[in-house]
Image (spheres, rainbow, N blue to C red):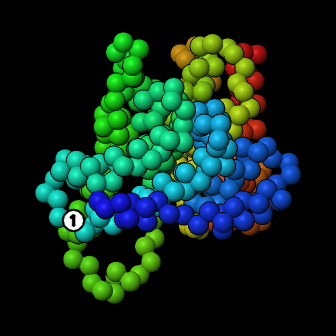
């Protein structure tokens, strides 16, 4: 890949982005600086979960060099998405015989040079698994259900050791890149291959693509939270509770898709009951029945439904509406376990 093309792929309109950031900042007096940046990134369609973004920024902000600020980290996340779109154009254009070839070629043409660029923004003592995790986060598609930082870090920590020889760090950059990006490139290759295999008519290609509605709510984080609470009996932090509920709702609702309450009420109740009950230890399963849980959640949602006349909303609006309701329910439920 020629240098001029690489520079073009990395180009972002920083002046416009800074102006947009300042507008959000002036409207968000109650938020912390990191929360403002997270809101800015969500509005730039980087992710749809503010809490996910806050967690990631809080982790990596101490890793950036003194000459850079947290906002620069946000710009790099936006730049990575711009870079991702350029690399996908190449993936669409090329005729790879298999995804292994696609991974090798794309890493060689695009990501080795990107790796060299992005390392200049972070401190020299940053671990290799932290770079690998960062690449997985930065280049994950917007519609990925969730980016739970601890899970990504733990996975990459196992895959990517930081190796020293005589106190000198050995260059394992290629291994780092492959760990963070191979799965993403493979998924993109599969998506492109499927798209190419379909003989779409010109009319169909011109239609706006509408994401199919998802059929389940993924509450694995709620399940883990409850299981941890049952075993350790430690108080659940408000932020952990918020993140688990937001993951549950975001896994189903999509921005730009309209939902009626009746469409998802039964699915929401069933999935929430299943995940809560699965998180309980046998001791508590003998106390809390599935039917009681189902009845309590149904009652909570019925109260919400009776006090809210609008029954048809965009996915993002449903997330905001239901988040507080379910957080309150889950918080009260946890309080009763050890009573």
Residue 178 % position (x, y): 31, 39
Q: Looking at the picture, does residue 232 appear above or below residue 219?
A: above
Residue at mark 1: 94
Q: Residue at x 34, y 80 (%)?
A: 205
Q: Looking at the picture, does residue 330 appear above or below residue 236?
A: below
- Find residue 165 and report its image quarter: top left
Q: Residue at x 51, y 26 (%)?
A: 125
Q: Residue furthest left?
A: 97
Kindly tell me whether residue 66 is visible in this rendering.
Answer: yes
Q: Residue at x 43, y 73 (%)?
A: 209
Q: Residue at x 67, y 14 (%)?
A: 233
Q: Looking at the picture, does residue 212 appear above or below residue 67?
A: below
**Towards the viewer: 37 or 274:** 37
- Find residue 329 and report its image quarter: top right
**Neighbourhood count class around disc 1 (C-alpha, 10 Å): few under 14, some 14–19, many 20 upward:** few
Residue 200 % position (x, y): 26, 79
């Amino acid at each position: 890949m020629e240098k001029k093309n690489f520079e073009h792929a990395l180009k972002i309109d920083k002046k416009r982005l800074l102006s947009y950031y300042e507008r959000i900042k002036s409207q968000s007096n109650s938020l912390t600086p990191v929360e403002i940046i997270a809101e800015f990134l969500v509005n730039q369609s980087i992710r749809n979960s503010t809490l996910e973004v806050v967690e990631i920024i809080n982790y990596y902000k101490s890793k950036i060099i003194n000459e850079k600020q947290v906002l620069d980290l946000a710009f790099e996340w936006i730049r990575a998405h711009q870079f991702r779109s350029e690399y996908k154009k190449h993936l669409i254009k090329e005729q790879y015989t298999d995804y292994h070839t696609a991974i090798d070629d794309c890493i060689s043409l695009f990501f080795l040079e990107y790796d060299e660029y992005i390392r200049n923004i972070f401190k020299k003592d940053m671990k290799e698994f932290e770079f690998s995790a960062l690449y997985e986060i930065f280049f994950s598609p917007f519609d990925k259900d969730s980016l739970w930082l601890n899970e990504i870090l733990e996975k990459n920590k196992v895959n990517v050791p930081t190796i020293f020889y005589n106190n000198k760090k050995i260059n394992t950059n290629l291994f780092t890149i492959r760990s963070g990006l191979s799965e993403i490139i493979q998924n993109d290759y599969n998506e492109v291959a499927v798209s190419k295999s379909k003989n779409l008519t010109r009319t169909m290609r011109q239609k706006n693509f509408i994401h199919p509605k998802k059929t389940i709510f993924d509450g694995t984080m709620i399940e883990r939270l409850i299981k941890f609470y049952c075993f350790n009996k430690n108080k659940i932090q408000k932020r952990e509770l918020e993140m688990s509920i937001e993951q549950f709702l975001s896994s189903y609702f999509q921005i730009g898709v309209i939902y009626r309450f009746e469409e998802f009420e039964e699915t929401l109740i069933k999935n929430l009951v299943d995940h809560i009950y699965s998180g309980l230890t046998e001791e508590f399963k003998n106390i809390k029945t599935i039917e009681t849980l189902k009845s309590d959640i149904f009652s909570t949602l019925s109260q919400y439904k009776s006090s809210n006349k609008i029954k048809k909303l965009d996915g993002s609006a449903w997330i905001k509406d239901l988040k507080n309701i379910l957080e309150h329910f889950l918080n009260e439920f946890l309080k009763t376990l050890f009573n």
